[in-house]
Image (cartoon, helix red, strand yellow):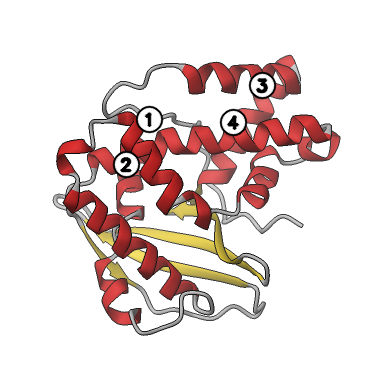
Amino acid sequence: MLKKFFLCLPLILSQPALAQETAAAKPDSDPQALVASVTEKILQTIKDNRARLGDAEFVAQKIEELIVPHIDQIAMSKLALGKHWRTATPEQRNQFVEEFKNLLIRTYKTSLVNYNDQTVDMLPFRPSAEQDRAVVSSSIKRAGGPPIRINYSMRYKPEDGWKVYDIVIEGVSLVTNYRSTFDREIMTGGMDKLLESMRNRNLQPQASGAGDKPAATASKPAGAAE
């Protein structure tokens, strides 16, 4: 399951069918339209810069530009830290948000480099009972195996629009996987030790094709943080 999770990360960035179906919609009012708009830019960036995907600084810059603005970093950080968010100091929270963002960027860098034009079918969109919540679902076609389902959990705020706060692949939540790892580290060494570990991990050179992998934990999609 963990292998599937990280093999699918490049596909999180590739949804051409969605882009075709929702190109006329307004990105600020439709979660699928937002994903379509961002996806189109990412795919075009990959096509235009294949030769530069080995440049870590260039890839990180593009991730900051194209992906990070559409991630709800606070909500995702709260969910990833779980109960420890309430007991963390404001400074610790700020440090965690920054280091967690950097950790995700390292993973996204691997995704961009490894992307190789797999295909994605968008599943029918079912509006949520809560107007500020949405789940965009897709099915990944892959050679030699059954399709893999990916759900993008999103939330809406008037000041931010739609943003992603979790990604769930075949019932495995990105946020919950990290939360399990972070909880063990905090219980062992405390919050400051976790922050130090994250900083050290983010400062390490990243080998080509390597990602930062949390422990695999099957779960239902996590709910949005308050």
Disc 1 target residue: 211
User: Who's the residue at 23% across and 31% down the image?
Assistant: 54
The furthest residue to the bottom: 24
Q: What is the CA distance from the residue labelled 3 to the residue labelled 4?
A: 10 Å
Q: Mark 3 or 4 closer to N-term? A: 4
Could you tell me which secondary element the residue under label 3 belongs to?
helix
Pick the quarter of the image with the N terminus: top left
Tell me: 165 left or right of 209. right
Nearer the viewer's eye, disc 4 or disc 1?
4
Q: Which residue corresponds to mark 3?
A: 194
User: What is the C-alpha distance between the residues marked 1 and 2?
Assistant: 8 Å
Sequence-wise first label, 3 or 2 = 2
Q: Pinpoint residue 60: horizontal percent, then vertical percent.
A: 39, 37
User: Mark 2 or mark 1, which is nearer the start of the sequence?
Assistant: 2
Q: Residues within 10 Å of mark 1 (few under 14, many from 20)?
A: some
Residue 99, labelled with which disc? 4
Mark 1 and mark 3 lie on one chain; the one further toward the N terminus is 3
Q: Amino acid at mark 3?
A: Leu
Which residue is pictured at 54% across the width and 16% down the height?
Answer: 200
The numbered disc on residue 111 is 2
Amino acid type shown at disc 4: Glu
Mark 4, secondary structure of its residue: helix
The quadrant of the image that shows the C terminus is bottom right
Which secondary structure lies at badge 2? helix
Q: Viewer-proximal residue, 94 or 126?
A: 94
